[in-house]
Amino acid sequence: MNTLQTGIFVLRTDHFDDTVAHLYEHLFIAKFKKLLADKYKIITPYGWLDGETFSDVIFLDFGFYQNEVKQLFESYTQSDHVFTHDEIQHELKRMGAELGVKLEPKDYNQVTEELRKIDEIGFTDVKKMDPVILDATAFRGSKIISEKAAKQSYVDYTVTAGLTDLTLEESLVFLRSLPIIYDLIDSIVYAQEAYGDTKSYPLSNTQNTMGAMAIYTFQKDSFSEEKLLKNLKTAFFQFGQMNRDLFGEWLQAYLKSFVNAKNWHTLTIDYYRYTGILTSREAVVAKMTPEAVLDLFSKLTFEITKTTDEHKEICY
């Protein structure tokens, strides 16, 4: 039986400030991920929660590997949310990196009041809504958050995670560990007020070498390659020290979804396309014990380089 719980939630923002609505999307997702980490002492693999804001609607696309996480999310969507000044400033900086601009509240109290009003509406399961036609392109801009073009203030860097001298069994483990690896990298990069949603499939130049890359946008004046590299190494080391039983429980739910989800059946073709490895989902799962995954993480090496056109062609 497939345990994957998926869905789309929407929130109508017709009469609200566009930029504040986008900010609310960022804050809402970040706060849920913190709630998840605080409650379960683990940040991955829980599934995914992504958002996209249009002029009149915020969309949330979610997939959770365990029903209890879905229940936590549903409870969270129905509760009231208060965002701190630090949380707001952090997400404004991440939005700035996403859009290539500098964002600054003209009136902080107005921003918090607008966030409160949006929060009062709450998200609705799209399946429970009547069809309606809206103008998805009519962005109204913002009257309470100033926006200044600042592309020169940002720089793209590529984070590459790789392994060499792998056995075939270790390569199989890497194939499906990649989403977990990306979750961990995201958690470290986003803490540095960066933004990124461009990643690669597994990459293999030889039969015993595997790697992957992700592109992120950082603020030039605060980016430190040395600090990021240190934080990545620390995060993966600490993740490797977690309770094996706890990780094993979450890993099994993740793998059960991987094997049974119908929309993932073509991943075996992608694995062959990008790495030359011909295998089945079942064969991958058979090798993915908690010990094998965490041992693989302890061997990962990282490289941080300025993003090139070649990187952009490789990532999706």
Image (cartoon, rainbow, N blue to C red):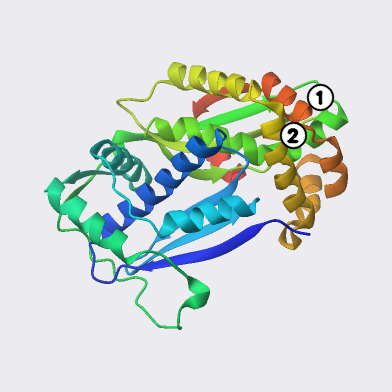
Are the two marked residues, 2 and 1, in contact with CB atoms closer than 8 angstroms?
yes
**Residue 7 falls in image quadrant:** bottom right
Q: As drawn, is 231 to the left or to the right of 83?
A: right
Tell me which residue sits at (82%, 27%) in the image.
Answer: 208
Q: Which quadrant, please, contains the N terminus?
A: bottom right
* Precedes in sequence: disc 2 or disc 1: 1
Q: Position of residue 181 (x, y in %)?
A: 62, 34
State the residue position of label 1.
166
Q: From where the camera sits, is residue 279 visible?
A: no
**At numbered mark 2, what does the secondary structure look like: helix, strand or loop?**
helix
Q: From where the camera sits, is residue 87 visible?
A: yes
State the residue position of label 2.
174
Q: Position of residue 314 (x, y in %)?
A: 61, 43
| Vertical placement of residue 248 versus 72, above or below | above
**Residue 201 falls in image quadrant:** top right
Q: Position of residue 88 (x, y in %)?
A: 27, 42
Q: Position of residue 222 (x, y in %)?
A: 32, 25
Residue flagged by tag 2: what amino acid is it? Phe
Q: As drawn, is 244 to the left or to the right of 122?
A: right
Residue flagged by tag 1: what amino acid is it? Leu
| Vertical placement of residue 293 versus 60, above or below | above
